[in-house]
Amino acid sequence: MNTSKKSVNNDPDVVLIGAGIMSATLGMMLKELQPDLTIEIFERLDVVTAESSDAWNNAGTGHSAFCELNYTPQKPDGSVEINKAIKIAESFELSREFWAYLVEKNIVTSPQDFIVNTPHMSFVWGNDNVDYLKKRYQALTKNHLFKGMLYSEDPAEIGEWAPLITEGRDPNEKIAATRMDIGTDVNFGELTRRIFNYLKGLPGISLSLNHEVRDIDRQRDGRWKVEVKNRKSGKKRDLLTPFVFIGAGGGSLHLLEKSGIKEGKGFGGFPVSGQWLVCTDPAIIERHQAKVYGKAAVGSPPMSVPHLDTRVIDGKKALLFGPYAGFSTKFLKNGSYLDLPKSIKLNNIGPMMAAGIQNIPLTKYLIDQVRQSPEDRLNALKDYMPSARLEDWKLEVAGQRVQVIKKDPKKGGILEFGTEVVSAADGSIAALLGASPGASTSVAIMLDLLKRCFAEKSSSEAWQSKLREMIPSYGKSLAKDAALLEKSRDRTARALGLNGVEV
């Protein structure tokens, strides 16, 4: 099935594999930078954005490091490390700038359908955790990216912010929370659909659904032969292209391995599935208006950070709690149970075994999560909502994530909890591996990819000028320039219909 009426020759300038937020962002940027580019996009499912970018498979936080405590670890001396939080917060502002550009150019309309203001909160209890959160607040608010953050240890005030987390709680329990009113909830699935709907109407762009890329081979002339199979008809097709982007979520590792580039050697993947408790009582849903993130339990991985989360999906407000982790050997929600065993090669078995030995607590954690009873899940929810009742919630399966395993000179192999772009030395092919904060930082990730893979064009005045039009702060530091950040946030708030903040 081909959803585009526009024809592309057999040798397109660019092939994008996977119809998620990453391919949408890169395709949109490239077509704006060079309108005469021919681009072919292939998606193995019959709809776009059905895997990691889909709203129900994605936390949708607009990961801006306002509330995610795993981005601000406490160091042995008791201080809080904030460099990663600053980088992620700055990256999210770049995403806002690009999305504002799309709205201003009428490429994407009705921004309220994909982004809405939802306060971001961090919430902890116990003396040590309260002490940590206060230190985190003090460290973060020294940087203007986090100006406007509120801190409270007053149960009454925290109850005004989010009544569900204080009602029924022991009044003698020490609690603390922070709040950022400019936090957002983002429906990345809806945003991705809007971008693809625009792209597929442009000349030189073809979007093919139900088409699976089976192989990628380097040719003598430097181009890539991409073998594609129509999953409905069974018909195969080969095409040649000078540039391939593999943005297939959990499917990226297999295709990177097929490319044979030396930069991809040694990479492995560790799949983790997720589940949500979804509230079924409209009255409860209506009483909560925030994304409340807590602290991962001692010994559990960063991906397990629990949150009581207001979502707006397809115009309807929802309330989720989780994630509860699970284990499956699939690399995609719609993948195969053979994905993990098929990914193991001679060049990555060493790093994968080393990472496995170092992450035995993670394996134990996943086993414990899989064995959880409904009552166990309810008890975890009650830490954040003491009055919760099992009959008001149902269990839903979320997306599948593949965490990156990579070579490490000291440890042999390490498990990474983040995203990683792997590209050939000549920039002719690139793959995106990993998970969170992925979608939220897609614009920053793609800007980095453009520098790597289109180095000469990226440094040209024509591309530089267009990049500054799309992302006005491009080449500057929002983390270091308070006036520039204020100007950026004012503009993007107006374009996207969001609340501003005094910086």
Image: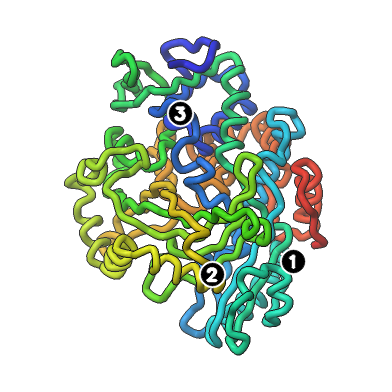
- Quick one: quadrant of the C terminus? bottom right
User: What residue is disc 1 on?
Assistant: 147
Looking at this view, name the residue that lies furthest to the front. 391
Give the residue displayed 38% in from the left and 18% down from the top: 240
For label 2, the SS is loop
Colour treatment of the image: rainbow
For label 1, the SS is loop
Residue 294 numbered tag? 2
Q: Is residue 229 rendered to the left or right of residue 152?
A: left
- Quick one: quadrant of the N terminus? top left
Q: What's the distance in space between the residues labelled 3 and 2, CA to CA?
A: 37 Å
Q: Work out whether residue 471 can be spotted.
A: yes
User: What residue is disc 3 on?
Assistant: 16
Residue 42: image quadrant is: top left
Packing grade of label 2 (10 A; few <14, some 14-19, many >=20) is many
Tell me where residue 250 appears, x and y as whole percent.
37, 42
Q: Earlier in the sequence, mark 2 or mark 1?
A: 1
